[in-house]
Amino acid sequence: MRFAIFALAALAATGCMSRSTSSGSGSGTGEVSPANTKLDISVSIGGSEAPTKTWTLECPDGGTLPNPERACAKLAVLDDPFAPVPKDKACTQVFGGPEEAVVTGTFRGEPVNAHFNKGNGCEIARWNSVEFLFPTS
């Protein structure tokens, strides 16, 4: 946890974090936001009859996802949160659970169609990096 806080502080100090530049208010609060982001998020339990849960997120602060401002701020510091695991990457063969998620829409104006699961160590790490988008997990 301390490392994550240190890493975020280092990013902020070097200016690597993108800042919201919404026109109009000019509040100067320095809010962190991935501009042009509008996502549809669904989470289900694979092989289960449990209902699929769905949310929306529109940055900087809209949608049905709980605490959208926090989610937008967390997305803002990630380089490519929806990239798939490279096909040639060696991954530990552990099973993290039957949860599956689909995220579609746009992130920083670019199309997103990402599928997440916990089928191996790489997929679990990928899931964990955006777990704040999946409030049921």
Image (spheres, rainbow, N blue to C red):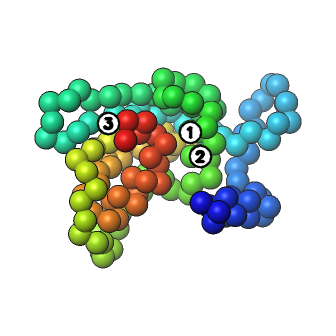
User: In the rendered view, would you say 94 is above or below 19?
Assistant: below
For image coordinates 49% across by 42% down, the residue present is 132
Does dot 3 land on a helix, a strand or a loop?
strand
Work out which quarter of the rendered image holds the N terminus and state it: bottom right
Report the residue marked by disc 2.
74
For image coordinates 70% across by 50% down, the residue present is 18
Report the residue marked by disc 3.
43
For image coordinates 43% across by 54% down, the residue present is 128
Q: How many marks?
A: 3
Label 1 close to label 3 by CB (< 8 Å): no
Neighbour class for label 2 at 10 Å: few (<14), some, many (≥20)? Answer: some
Percent coordinates x, y for residue 44 in the rendering: 26, 36
Neighbour class for label 1 at 10 Å: few (<14), some, many (≥20)? Answer: many
Which quarter of the figure has residue 51? top left
The amino acid type found where label 3 is placed reads Val
- C-alpha gap between disc 2 and disc 1: 5 Å
